[in-house]
Image (spheres, rainbow, N blue to C red):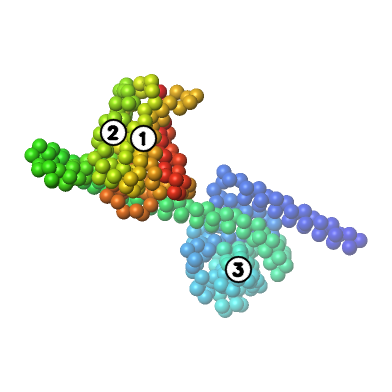
Amino acid sequence: MQDEQQNLQDLELANRLLDSFSRISEVINTRRLDYHTRLGRILKVILEYLGVEQGSLMVLERKKHLVVRAANRPEIIGQEQTLDDERSVASWVARQQEPLFIKDIGDDKRFNKMDSANYRRNSLLSIPILHKGKVLGVINVTDKLGDRDLLKEDITRLFDFSSIILSLLVQENLQQDLRRQQRILRERNLELRKQETVRAELSRLLIHDLKGPLAEVVANLDILSYSVAEENREFLESAQIGCDRAVRMVSNLVSIGKIEDGKLVPIKEVIEPGPMLAECLSSIKGMAKIKDVELIMEVEADLPQISLDRTLIMRVMQNLLTNALGYCTGNTTIRFGCRRVIGKKQLEFYVQDQGPGIPVAKHLSIFEKYSRASNKQDTLVGTGLGLYFCRLAVDVHRGRIGLESEPGQGSRFYFTLPL
């Protein structure tokens, strides 16, 4: 008979324990409740199961402080104890990483006595909440209801509850780390945006200050071209080519800034592709002559007219031609032109050189800002903004730019524009 009663009592305790676990799990998974509210409800379930009136749940914060985050007495929530407090039971438990059961704290000279005005009994139980060998918090209980006082057997049950609470504490620590990283990223992004704004403003001022002197040099070189001696004409032409390139680089910088800011709207006009390409040839042939490179223009017969921003697209072609010249050696050929795209209402403009070619791995990145095909030093190879400008200019025309190339086989840059 006694065995049956004991079995029934054990079964009842087991059911109560499972019910408590279920209630705690439900609280943990109720995301609409904030962290501290969930801790308070979990502590309430624990106190009810153990049959105690007083209890608190302390969380280790800032590595050295145990902070009361849940308690049956609201006035102590937020109170702190440092880990090195020799007179604190909770601090001792956290340091030693082991539970502590004290039958009568009045007889234990190591710790402060409990306030008799707030506590009915002198026995207490504290256990650490551990995760991977580290303390995350401490659970404290006292004032057992009824005739029974706290027993050492309650340690086992409290450890069972701590293992469930652990998931909430770990979750909160991860969320705090995430929020901290997000805050750091926001601060760094803000600083980067400020730096980018300063750099953009400095670039704008520099570009503005360069345009005047460059225009003056170009005008003076043009005047000199009417009176220069024939034996010095080659030097004058080289100077003019260098100025043209500098003007084009400044124009690229201006256009890149406007396109990136969304302030550049193409001024479109209906044009014939052939005459536009002939004008590109005229502006580049001086460079080709100096490098001993032959330029061959190929324009498919009966091409339709196309609506585009003539200035932008001419600069795209000039950039592609200048880029090809920069990587070509003497006695080679560059072919460029325009043709229909079969089966589509598009025209394709292209530049084909006989240079060293470009590895496939660089075909996409080469159109990024400051990207270059190689580290080759050449007066015609710029800072890596030319192809980036080409991509942006083609993009604002709703076109597509690309590259066909293999090392040792030359390169073919092309872009398509809708009719």
Distance from the alpha carbon under mark 3 to that under mark 2: 73 Å
Residue 264 vertical position relative to residue 243 in the rendered view, above or below: above
Q: Residue at x 62, y 59 (%)?
A: 166
Residue 310: x %, y % from top left? 29, 28
The circle on residue 237 is none
Task: Name the kind of residue labelled 3 in the image.
Answer: Gly
Direction from residue 221 to residue 294 in the image, left or right: right
Identify the residue shown where x is 30% and y is 28%: 276
Residue at 64 percent of width and 70 percent of height: 99
Question: Residue 123's spot in the image, x, y percent?
Answer: 64, 69
Residue 290, relative to residue 146: is it above or below? above
Amino acid carrying label 2: it is Cys
Of residue 356 and residue 123, the one placed in the foreground of this image is 356
Q: Look at the image and tell me in which quarter the C terminus lies.
A: top left
Crowd class of label 1 (few under 14; some 14 to 19; many from 20; radius 10 Å) = many
- How far apart marks 1 and 3 lie (CA) works out to 70 Å
Element assignment for label 1: strand
Among the 4 quarters of the image, the one containing residue 351:
top left
Q: Position of residue 350 (x, y in %)?
A: 39, 34
Label 3: element kind: loop
Q: Are marks 1 and 2 in contact (CB under 8 Å)?
A: yes
Mark nearer the N terminus (1 vs 2)? 2
Task: Give the labeled residue for mark 3.
Answer: 133
Closest to the camera, between mark 1 and mark 3, is 1
- Residue that numbered label 2 is attached to: 280
Residue occupied by mark 1:
336
